[in-house]
């Protein structure tokens, strides 16, 4: 798997993480981003460290910090909701409305049969996602998601429970059919920095999105 670099300076790297590459080494074995970090030293003594998380299936912009001080500052920016995040997702159905905001608090549940998952719950942690319909094709819809919070599986649950249609291919919150993976892509990231230009990157639309008839335009 290639790891295209979308942004690079002395503090930060943003890579276009391919779908199917987990950040941590799977229990069952296999390659993870953890195994590839030495490739991303690019002349530095330290390997960079991921600042935030993307699911195995999610492609696109992933921010890596090149030193511990930068890691702390970037993590704080995420915690304080100062980071602009733009995702593209293909949902398995049509959407009537053009745009809106989903505010559904989320909580984690677990069972021996199904493992763990996130569910909407009044006593859960607040989660807010703004969305906009971009295009429809063959019964699927391309949606732009701008999460205001960063809860685990937030966009996946908000699509299924808030929009009423899950992301195409989602095996947990949908039926897992179509797409070959959960069709979610981290398309853009802007991280503000005091006294410096922001870290800003955009990841091109992946080939599997294009194969379903969608484009960057």
Image (cartoon, grey):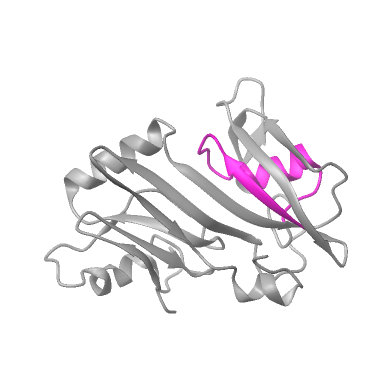
Front-lying residue, 52 or 190: 190
Q: Is residue 155 above or below residue 82?
A: below
- Residue found 77% across the figure and 65% down from its top: 177
Task: Using residue 116 as the reference point, say whether residue 96 is left or right of it.
Answer: right
Can residue 111 be seen here? The reply is no
Tell me which segment is drawn in magenta.
141-167
Residue 183 visible to the viewer:
yes
The C terminus: image quadrant: bottom right
- Give the residue at x 84% y 41%: 97
- Residue 27 horizontal side relative to residue 170, left or right: left
Q: Residue furthest top?
A: 123
Viewer-closest of 107 and 97: 97
Q: Residue at x 32, y 65 (%)?
A: 34
Q: Is residue 153 left or right of residue 119?
A: left
Give residue 83's quadrant in the image.
Answer: top left
Q: Is 217 drawn above or below residue 97 in the view shown? A: below
Relative vertical location of residue 153 with respect to residue 176 in this rendering, above or below: above
Total number of numbered labels? Answer: 0
Q: Identify the residue at horizontal 28%, vertical 67% (top origin).
A: 37
Residue 20: image location, x then y, percent:
53, 69
Pinpoint residue 61: horizontal percent, then vertical percent.
46, 59
**Displayed quadrant of residue 147:** top right
The quadrant of the picture occupied by the N terminus is bottom left
The picture places residue 117, in percent across and down from the top left corner, at: 61, 43
Observer-nearest residue: 111 or 194?
194
Q: Is residue 139 magenta?
A: no
Residue 214, position as x, y percentages in the image = 73, 68
Residue 5 shown left or right of residue 217 in the figure? left
């Amino acid at each position: 798997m290639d790891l295209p670099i979308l942004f690079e300076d002395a503090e930060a790297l943003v890579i276009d993480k391919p779908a199917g590459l987990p950040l941590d080494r799977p229990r069952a074995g296999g390659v993870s981003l953890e195994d590839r970090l030495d490739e991303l030293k690019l002349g530095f003594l330290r390997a960079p460290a991921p600042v935030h998380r993307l699911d195995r299936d999610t492609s696109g912009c992933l921010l890596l910090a090149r030193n511990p001080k930068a890691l702390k500052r970037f993590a704080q920016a995420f915690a304080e909701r100062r980071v602009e995040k733009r995702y593209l997702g293909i949902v398995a159905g049509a959407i009537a409305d053009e745009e809106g905001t989903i505010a559904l608090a989320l909580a984690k549940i677990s069972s021996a049969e199904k493992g763990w998952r996130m569910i909407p719950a009044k006593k859960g942690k607040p989660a807010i996602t703004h969305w906009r319909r971009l295009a429809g094709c063959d019964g699927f819809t391309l949606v732009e998601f701008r999460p205001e919070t960063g809860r685990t599986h937030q966009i996946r649950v908000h699509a299924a429970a808030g929009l009423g249609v899950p992301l195409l291919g989602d095996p947990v919150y949908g039926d897992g059919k179509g797409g070959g993976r959960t069709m979610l892509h981290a398309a853009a990231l802007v991280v503000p920095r005091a006294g410096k230009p922001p870290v800003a990157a955009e990841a091109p639309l992946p080939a599997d999105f294009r194969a379903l008839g969608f484009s960057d335009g």
